[in-house]
Amino acid sequence: MEKVSVIIPTKNRNEMLFECISSLVETNQKQIAEIIVINDGDKRVDFESTSIPVLIFKNKLSGVASARNLGAEKANSEIILFFDDDMIPTEGMVQRIINFHAQHQRSVLNLDWIYPLELTQEIKNNGFGRYLINYGFTSLKGLHNNPSDWNDIRYRKMNAVTSQNLSIRKSLFTELGGYDDRMPFAGFEDAVFSKNLVNAGVDIYLDTVALTYHNERDRIELKPWLDRKVRGSFTRRIAVQNGFGEFNINYGTFKGLLLNVL
């Protein structure tokens, strides 16, 4: 039976990482060959032995793009799953990934996600949490403006990926050259990788039936949420400086001046 190598980049989020790994072992252990953790932070990462090998490597460069590249290099399975440390799997998730790639040799797959129910209930009690809910930041469907036919199409054709739960054949990933490791932070490496996928004629699909939970409970307050946006904007600038001019944003004179002042 074909199995999957799960690659988890992490940076100083040990508690969330352990919850992620424990959930993977509990719900999908028969389909996972190994869990590869790439430590991009300054905190030591250890994990007790499980029924699945957990291999831990220190990132030799810096940034989530290079961490994912290193994980793919170390992977022993043909199917690799990039899975962020703040994601929680559901039962049967990995088997659905295996089934998809058996039928789609030159495609990548994302899975749907929502905030865990308890996290959604928690953030209803503060103003910023209600802002996140109102503007759709608590689900992938919300980020796509809540289309009414979201679940009518199991495999939705997409034009971009989100690497928080992305599966791809290792041979295809190698052919594409992986992620651009010049990207220093998370936030825009996905856009560059998506462009490479489209240019190579690779189909991007979203499975709206296979659900995962986005457990980013350390980013549900205003400051850490904005810090994440700043890092993403900085990464976007790096992408533009490295030749991806189509990602440049041209503001009007007044708005550009205002943003510079701010």
Image (cartoon, rainbow, N blue to C red):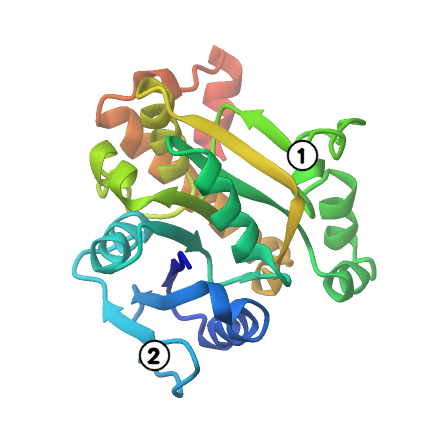
Relative to the observer, which residue lies in front, 232 or 74? 74
Horizontal arrangement in the rendering, residue 232 relative to residue 245 (left or right)? right
Horizontal arrangement in the rendering, residue 120 relative to residue 19 (left or right)? right
Residue at the spot x=28%, y=36% of the render?
172
The answer to which image quadrant residue 73 occupies is: bottom left
Residue at the spot x=45%, y=41% of the render?
101
Give the labeled residue for mark 2: 45
Reply above or below: 135 against 255. below
Verify CB contact (< 8 Å) between mark 1 and mark 2. Answer: no
The label shown at residue 154 is 1
Assign the N terminus to one quadrant of the image: bottom left
Q: Residue furthest front?
A: 1
Residue at the spot x=69%, y=55% of the render?
115
Q: Position of residue 168 (x, y in %)?
A: 38, 42
Badge 2 element: loop
Relative to the observer, which residue lies in front, 27 or 110? 27
